[in-house]
Structures are given as structure tokens and as C-alpha cells.
Amino acid sequence: MKTQIIVAAVASALSFGAFAMTKADYDASKNRIDADYKVAKERCAPMSANAKDICQAEEKGKHNVAKKELEASYKPTDKNRYDARVAKADAMYDVAKEKCDDQSGNAKDVCVKEAKAVLAKAKADAKANKEVAAAVDKAGEKTADANKQATEKIADARKDAAETKLDADYKVAKEKCDALSGTAKDNCVTAAKTKYGK
């Protein structure tokens, strides 16, 4: 929690141009993030079984996100902002996947598919945001032709993200049909194909 507050404060200050983060500030924040992670891992130590796995996944995810957000604050590039978004998506997926281990059979399969769908959507959004930012940056430097190209790239990036999300939702819907049998399963699959244009 302390790490997230530090990173949020740094990001907020940078976004308003209040100060530029020095290398010393960056190094100190990085050391605090690592120290907080060591303490947080100890919280998981007395736990057992899947509860311990979930706890470890949560703490590792928080650590990775804090490091990527710090990097994006220190060097606010499109790539670093993208990496921070992907780190958040990966962290959510790792925790969700661990939570699926508490289930079995089709319920577990559906849970895993849903976790993968959320991951695919978040990564698609992160990629689209990165491409949009790059296109906007490039458009700012070019003439009307560049603006037209940027608009096309933005549309393509959003279309790709939408298709990725649709595919992810279709996989979840199809997986849910596996719990059924016979005509009910066939109807479920047909409905999923119709809904998602497959």
C-alpha cells in the first residue's frame, strides 16, 4: 500500500509538472518498492495451500506493477506506459488463475477462460492505447497527410482491440457450453457463434 501511494504521488506530481524525478528519487523509490515487497511476502509465509499461492501472486503482481509504474513516472514514454498497463493485466491474470485452482471440472475451465479473456482484453487495450499515443505523437509532427494516416492507424488499432475482445468473449461462451450436452450444447454453441459472428 505504501509503495502504491509513493508511486501514485510521483506520477501525480509528474503529470502536473510539479517536479522532475531525479535519479536519486527514482533509486530511493525503487529501493522502497523492493523493501515493501520483502515485507509483503512474509505476510504470505504462514498461509498454506492455494491461499498461499493466491497471496504470493497478489504480492508479486503489486511489486511488478509498482516497478513498472515507477519506471513510467521516471521515463514517461509510450513504451513504459504500455509496460505498466501490461504489468497490471498480467498481475490480475495471475491472481485470477490462482483463484481458479479452488474450482474443478467445467467451472475451473470456465474460470481460466474468463481470466484469459480479461487478460487478452487488457493487453488489447494497452496495445491500442500505445498505438493511439504513437499515432497522435507522429501526427503532431506531420502535415494533414500524417493526420489522416494517424486516424487510420487509430481506427485499425481500435478494430484490432475489438476483435481480440470479441474472440476472448467467444472462447468463454463456448467453454460454458461444454457443461451442457446433446441439443442444449448444440444450441448453446450455435447461439455463441451467432452472437460473436463465428
Image: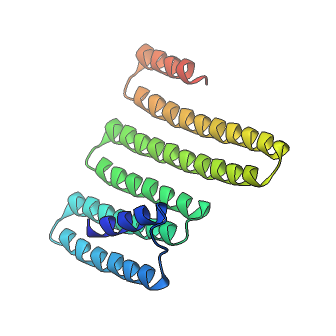
Q: Where is residue 23 in the image (x, y as percent from the top left)?
A: 49, 83
Residue shown at 56%/18% (left/top)? 194
Compare residues 29 and 169 and report the one nearer the observer: 29
Q: Where is residue 166 in the image (x, y as percent from the top left)?
A: 55, 32
Image quadrant where one finds the N terminus: bottom left
Rendering quarter of residue 98: bottom left
Seen in the picture, residue 22 relative to 128 is either above or below; the reply is below
Which of the colour schemes (rainbow, by chain, secondary structure, one colour) is used? rainbow
Seen in the picture, residue 39 relative to 8 is either above or below; the reply is below
Residue shown at 63%/51% (left/top)? 133
Residue shown at 40%/68% (left/top)? 10
Rendering quarter of residue 62: bottom left
Relative side of 68 to 54, left or right = right
Relative side of 136 to 187, left or right = right
Q: In the displayed orientation, state which residue is furthest to the front.
A: 18
Q: In the displayed orientation, state which residue is furthest to the bottom.
A: 24
Compare residues 162 and 143 and report the one nearer the observer: 143
Q: Where is residue 136 in the image (x, y as percent from the top left)?
A: 68, 49
Relative side of 59 to 113, left or right = left
Residue shown at 60%/40% (left/top)? 161
